[in-house]
Every structure is written in structure tokens, then in C-alpha cells.
Amino acid sequence: MNRVTSVTGNVIENVCIAQT
């Protein structure tokens, strides 16, 4: 679960950066 959470977190961060 930790790996999945970290991966999804990275994706969310990338999306936020892309929107910025």
C-alpha cells in the first residue's frame, strides 16, 4: 500500500505542477 500511495502522490504532484 505504501508504494501505491507514494506513486499516486507523485502523480497528483505532477498534475498540480502541470496545471501550474
Image (cartoon, rainbow, N blue to C red):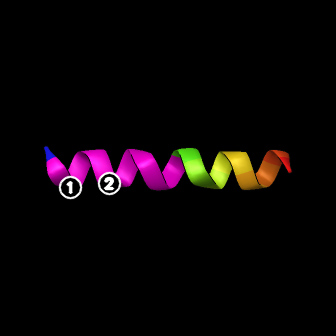
Q: Is residue 15 left or right of residue 6?
A: right
Magenta highlight: main SS: helix
Q: CA distance from mark 2 to mark 1?
A: 5 Å
**Dot 1: few (<14), some (14–19), or many (≥20) neighbours within 10 Å?**
few
* Residue of label 1: 3
Residue 17: give x, y in percent of width and height: 74, 55
Which residue sits at x=67%, y=46%? 15
Residue sticking out furthest to the right: 20
Quadrant in the picture for residue 12: top right
Could you say whether the residue bearing mark 2 is in a helix, strand or loop? helix
The part of the chain drawn in magenta is 2-11
- Disc 2 crowd rating (10 Å Cα; few below 14, some 14-19, many 20+) is few
Judge from the rendering whether residue 15 lies leftward or rightward of residue 8; answer left or right: right
Quarter where residue 19 is shown: top right
- The residue where tag 2 is placed is 6
* C-beta proximity under 8 Å, tags 2 and 1: yes
